[in-house]
């Protein structure tokens, strides 16, 4: 496992504010969602699937707020709802080469992909927002508040890319894995 980027403590505060509006109505969020649709987190993925929508890419780690998800939630995240399942290692507060490359591959594919993360998937929202096309929707959980709906546009993409560039590690390698021009 190769860690490519690591979130240093000084940047944590910049992730506290959501990158989009927060809602508790998953059906309403999905009604406004663009494509591709990417979910990051077990609870968000669970609610998306329960609302009858299968994300193009979903990141899960069997945890929520650092605790194991309820067995009923995990059981409802049916791998058979997806065309393929990938398993990757990704320690907390990091982005590994495996996460970055697996996402880039999933985004380039027409197959709906479930990415099961051994470790933590929270930061996966960043390379997703930095990579998906304008109008795409990225959904992730805001603890104790609801689901954040990011409708990707150039401004939010640039903001997230700048944040990724400030993380410790090899930004050039991360951007190359995602097919992002570093300039």
Image (spheres, rainbow, N blue to C red):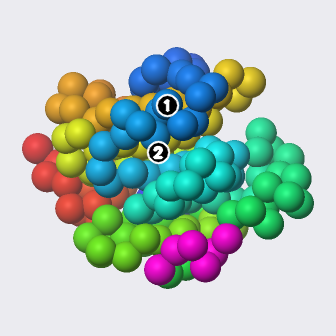
- Circle 2: is it few (<14), some (14-19), or many (20+) Cα within 10 Å? many
- Separation (CA) of disc 1 from disc 2: 21 Å
149 falls in the magenta region: no
Query: Where residue 47 appears, x then y in whole percent?
Result: 65, 46
Residue 125 image label: 2
In this rendered view, identify the residue nearer to me: 38 or 94. Answer: 38
Tag 2 or tag 1, which sits nearer the N-term? 1
Query: Residue 180's quadrant in the figure?
Result: bottom left
The correct choice, above or below, for 92 with respect to 30 in the image is: below
Decide if residue 75 is on the left or right side of residue 133.
right
The correct choice, above or below, for 73 with respect to 9 in the image is: below
Residue 40 is at least partly visible in this image: yes
Provide the residue designation for mark 1: 28
- Circle 1: is it few (<14), some (14-19), or many (20+) Cα within 10 Å? few
Query: Residue 56's quadrant in the figure?
Result: bottom left
Query: Residue 159's quadrant in the figure?
Result: top left
Q: Determine whether the residue tagged by mark 1 lies in a helix, strand or loop.
A: helix
Magenta span:
78-83
Look at 74% across and 24% down and name the residue there.
144
What number of labels is visible? Answer: 2
Decide if residue 126 is on the left or right side of residue 44.
left
Query: Where residue 120 appears, x then y in whole percent?
Result: 66, 54
Query: Where residue 141 appears, x then y in whole percent?
Result: 61, 36
In this rendered view, identify the residue nearer to me: 92 or 73. Answer: 73
């Amino acid at each position: 496992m190769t860690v490519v980027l690591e979130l240093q403590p000084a940047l944590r505060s910049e992730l506290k504010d959501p990158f989009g509006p927060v809602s508790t109505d998953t059906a309403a969020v999905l009604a406004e969602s663009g494509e591709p649709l990417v979910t990051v987190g077990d609870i968000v993925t669970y609610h998306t699937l329960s609302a009858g929508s299968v994300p193009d890419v979903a990141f899960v780690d069997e945890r929520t707020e650092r605790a194991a998800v309820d067995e009923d939630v995990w059981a409802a995240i049916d791998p058979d709802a997806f065309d393929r399942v990938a398993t990757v290692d990704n320690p907390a507060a990091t982005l590994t080469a495996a996460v970055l490359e697996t996402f880039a591959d999933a985004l380039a594919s027409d197959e709906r992909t479930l990415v099961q993360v051994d470790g933590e998937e929270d930061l996966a929202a960043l390379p997703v927002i930095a990579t998906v096309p304008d109008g795409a929707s990225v959904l992730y959980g805001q603890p104790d508040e609801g689901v954040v709906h990011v409708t990707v546009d150039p401004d939010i993409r640039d903001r997230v890319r700048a944040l990724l560039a400030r993380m410790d590690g090899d930004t050039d390698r991360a951007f190359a894995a995602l097919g992002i021009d570093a300039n």
